[in-house]
Image: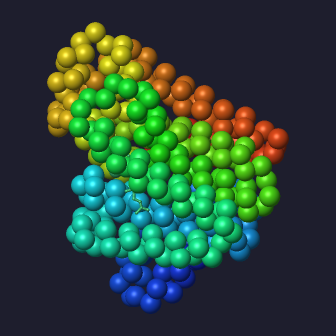
Amino acid sequence: MEELSLVKNQIKEYIQECGDQKSCDLLEMLAEGKMLRSKLILKIAGVNDNSIKLCSVVEMIHAASLLHDDVIDESDTRRGKPSINALFDNKTAIMFGDILYSKAFTELSQMDKKIAHTVSSAVTLLSIGEMLDVDLTNNFNTSYDKYFDMIYKKTASLIEASAKAAALLCGKDEIAFALYGKNLGLAFQMIDDILDITQDSATLGKPAMLDFVEGKVTIPYLLLHERIEDKEKLESLYKKPLNEQESSWIKEEMIKNNVLIDSISQAQKLGLEAVEAIKMDENEDLKNIMNQMINREF
Ligand code: FPP
Ligand code: MG
């Protein structure tokens, strides 16, 4: 998508405006992402000055949240490359996150009030979501409600806000597009949680099957815990580094209990609900974004 390079250039310009060479250098070191939020915004609002600025603000917020997340998760890889905290240290990752985040807010403050409010309140939810995620790693969580509330806040809120803000930008139905973004975001996180189990580390760009070791009881583990007879064995592996035999046992039990298939169909259902919310827009591109997101491999 050619338009995405316009977003990348705009972000570069924003950081250059901060007048700090180290920030420009750090920006160059960030591994490129899928830019899902920008793709959505551009497909909803079209390509123009305002939509490119909105994309840049959202991508900078997203990048800041990942910089902080890698510190919180003590993760040394991001998208197949060493994370900034691994390359430098936690302090650098936090401070550069703060620079990206605050510059994004400076630009957001110059935008339409409703758009600024939509995006800024999503960042509060995002931060609460991260706190819930960390809190949920204290014990083996068996509550779907807690899982869904957490992934809504941690991941779907900013995607929801991106779609809603894009609709506001071009005068489309903001409620319908917010619902599209929300369901797409929920499905996105569920697919992420499934890929953690089904893909190898080379494909993921980070260690595979790490969620459970980190204490994250994601949708496949929730379903498995509900269905499996030997709950104690599953619980005994929680938050432990898994050897080959243990991770194979988990995967086999997941297959035996139809856990992966059912997790994928839950994500698909949310994806279809997303597309249903905006069917009046007759936008094939938004349908494709949903399908690609569901069928992705990393
Ligand atoms: C990745 O989750 C993390 C997020 C989607 C949100 C993180 C949010 C914050 C740290 C709040 C701070 C926000 C700002 C703007 C400074 P994950 O760990 O499940 O995914 P991963 O495997 O990609 O790391
Ligand atoms: Mg993380």
Q: How many marks?
A: 0
Q: Is residue 111 above or below residue 32?
A: below
Decide if residue 113 is on the left or right side of residue 60: right
* Percent position of residue 189, x then y: 47, 41
Q: Nearer the viewer, residue 2 or 257?
A: 257
Say whether residue 75 is visible: no
Q: Is residue 51 above or below residue 139?
A: below
Decide if residue 292 is on the left or right side of residue 279: left
* Percent position of residue 248, x then y: 26, 26
* Percent position of residue 22, x then y: 35, 84
Q: Is residue 91 above or below residue 40?
A: below
Image quarter where the N terminus lies is bottom right
Q: Is residue 128 above or below residue 218?
A: below
Residue at image point 31% right, 63% down: 83
What kind of colouring is applied to the model shown?
rainbow
Residue at image point 17% right, 35% down: 240
Say whether residue 90 is visible: yes
Residue at image point 21% right, 30% down: 238
Q: Quadrant of residue 53?
A: bottom right
Image quarter where the C terminus lies is top left
Q: Nearer the viewer, residue 291 or 15?
A: 15
Residue at image point 77% right, 49% down: 173
* Percent position of residue 128, x then y: 40, 50
